[in-house]
Amino acid sequence: MGSKQAQLNTTLTLKQCAEVFRIGAQKARGVGSVLGGAAAKVMGNDQSGYFTPTNDSPFASLDDNPPDFTVGVFVPKFAGGGTGNGTAVHMYVWDRGTTRSVELYAPHGLTGGMHARKLVDKVSESFSEADPDTRVMAG
């Protein structure tokens, strides 16, 4: 199990960050994603859509800096058979007053690294397009 990540600093508001995430996730959906999602729906395995990531750790209550906003989306990919394969990308946003700290996170299995990287890159690009002053601090 691995993950792809990016950390950004932006002047966009929390609401704007949410909209940019939605746009980036849509841009990341290529033909394979649309076909994979359709096949998963037909087979009854559709997991696509937005969700709120949860922290199930027993230490979660000790987090002294929880994000101000979290969202995730599952983006299917076409793998044949309508198995619902795909990757989730999460966004965590902290309001720092004049800026927002944004972390993008896409967990993946052994074969999902390229799809996870594509999702993180597309969402990051959407932030740079919406706010040219966005700084990518790691990725």
Image: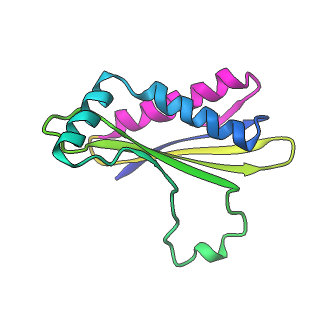
Asked if the stretch drawn in magenta spans residue 113, the answer is yes
Residue in view at x 45 percent, y 34 percent = 119
- Of helix, strand and loop, which mostly describes the magenta segment? helix
Q: Is residue 8 visible?
A: no
Image position, residue 120 (x, y; %): 50, 35
What is the quadrant of the C terminus in the image?
A: top right
- The answer to whether residue 104 is visible is yes
Expressed as whole percent of the image width and height from the top left, the position of residue 110 reads 27, 46
Residue pictured at 33% horizontal, 48% vertical: 47
**Foreground residue among 116 and 23:** 23
Could you tell me which residue is drawn at 28 percent across and 46 percent down?
A: 46
Which residue sits furthest right?
Answer: 98
Q: Is residue 84 magenta?
A: no
Q: Which residues are magenta?
A: 112-139
Q: Position of residue 81 (x, y in %)?
A: 13, 39
Where 86 sits versus 131, above or below?
Answer: below
Q: Is residue 123 left or right of residue 112?
A: right
Give left or right: position of 98 versus 120: right
- Judge by depth and name the residue closer to the eye, 71 or 128: 71
Most foreground residue, 16 or 132: 16
Quarter of the image for residue 38 reads: top left
